[in-house]
Each structure stands twice: as structure tokens, then as C-alpha cells.
Image (cartoon, grey):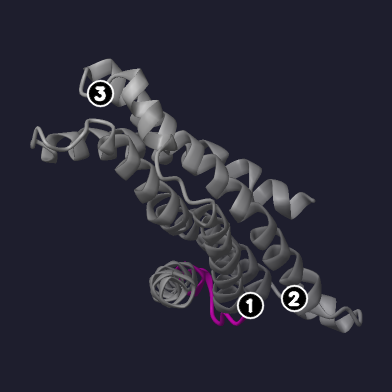
Amino acid sequence: MEECVGIGVNSIFIVAIVSTFIGAVSCIQTAYNLVSPLIPVSTVALIVRDMTILELAPTITCIVLAGKVGSNIAGELGTMRISEQVDALEVMGINSSSYLVLPKVLAAMFTFPLLVILSAFLGILGGYLAGTLTGVISPRDYIYGIRDSFVPYNIFFMCLKPFVFGFLIATISSYQGYFTKGGALEVGQSSTQAVTNSCIAILVADYALAQLFL
């Protein structure tokens, strides 16, 4: 539970800010590019909805979380390694990897889908607020657009992505931190490496999941 709070609850603010503004920008830019009178205005909301659910909410949110959560995990475990706290656990007969790493992996796999659901909601809400306040789309057209041609399977796919991404971020970051050697400089390098590798893994997994499930 403590790991869920550290990984999930403490990330709500940054996820909310990023998601709301991404949804708002997506709405404005989509409306800017749809200039043909033959295209219904409600198409703006439809595009924002599908972009948010299929890609922006799960992928962008998890990349942001890779920077926040991944660096935190790597830094925490790296500090414990160089300060010999991990060695102390092993001397006491405690399986340090299970005790330190497993809760972080499970917490990430549990909380990331919840954060992505929140991100999708706020992204669509941000698009609604931006579109209606600037006058590029009416509230009625926006609501019609987000309900038009809705595919429920996309919600399942959206929730599947962060489940996989959470596992990747937690395991990669834990590995980088757990096997840190040296001093404080190496802890920083491990954190940087954890974020970089996690982002690459997310993008590769994103492509693989799209090929397999879409």
C-alpha cells in the first residue's frame, strides 16, 4: 500500500496537468487542421477521443511516469545499494530483491492503469473546455463527437498498455538501481539510465501491442 501511494497517488498531480493540457492542445490543433466544410465539426471531438484513448493517455502518461517514478525507484535502490542497506538485508536472511523490488513492480502494475484512466478522462475534458471556451466547437457537437462510433474494445486496449508499461518501468528501474556500484555519481547515472531505457522499452512495447491487439 505504501508503494501504491508513492507511485500512484503522488503522481496524480503531474498526470492531471499533463493530460488536461494535452487534450486541450489536441482539440485546438485538430480544429485548426479540419478546415473543410464537408467534415462535420463533431469530428474534432471524435479525433480527440480516439487519440487520447489509444495513444496519448497510455503512452504519454507512462513516459511522464517513467521520468518521475523510474528515476525515483532507481535512485532509492541505488542509494540503498551503495549505503550497504541491501547487503544488511541479505545478511539477515531476507531476500532483498523480493522485499525491495516486488512491491514496486506490483504497485506500478496496479496504479498505472488507474492513472491512465484518469488521464483519458482529463484529456477529453481538457479538449471539451478548450474547444468550447475558444468557440471552435459547441458543447453539443463535442459531446456528440465523443459518443459517435465509439468502440468499447479501445478501453480494454488503453488499460492493457499501462499494465505492461508499468511492469517494464518498474523492472528496468529496479534493475538499474539494484545493481548500482560506486557512489553518489553512479546513483545519478543509474537513474538517468533507468529513465532512458524505460522510455525506449515503452515505445517498443507500444508498437508491439498495437501490432498484436489492433
Q: Give the percent coordinates (x, y) of residue 23.
A: 35, 37
Q: Nearer the viewer, residue 201 or 190?
A: 201
Residue density around tag 2, few if under 14, some if 14–19, many if 20 or more, within 10 Å: many
The three-letter amino acid code for the residue at tag 1 is Tyr
Task: Determine which residue is flagged by label 3.
Answer: 137
Ranked by sequence position, the earlier of labels 3 and 1 is 3
SS at mark 3? loop
Q: Is residue 124 left or right of residue 89?
A: left
- Nearer the observer: mark 3 or 1; the answer is 3
The three-letter amino acid code for the residue at tag 2 is Val
Q: CA distance from mark 3 to mark 1?
A: 51 Å
Is the residue under label 1 in contact with that under label 3 (CB below 8 Å)?
A: no
- Nearer the observer: mark 2 or 1; the answer is 1
| Displayed quadrant of residue 84 | bottom right
Using the image, determine if residue 22 lies above or below residue 83: above
Task: Determine which residue is flagged by label 2.
Answer: 86
Ranked by sequence position, the earlier of labels 2 and 3 is 2
- Nearer the observer: mark 2 or 3; the answer is 3
Quadrant including the C terminus: bottom left
Residue 94 is at least partly visible in this image:
yes
Residue at position x 42%, y 40% from top?
19
Q: CA distance from mark 2 to mark 3?
A: 57 Å
Q: CA distance from mark 2 to mark 1?
A: 8 Å
The three-letter amino acid code for the residue at tag 3 is Ile
| Displayed quadrant of residue 204 | bottom left
Q: Nearer the viewer, residue 190 or 168?
A: 168
| Magenta stretch bounds | 179-188
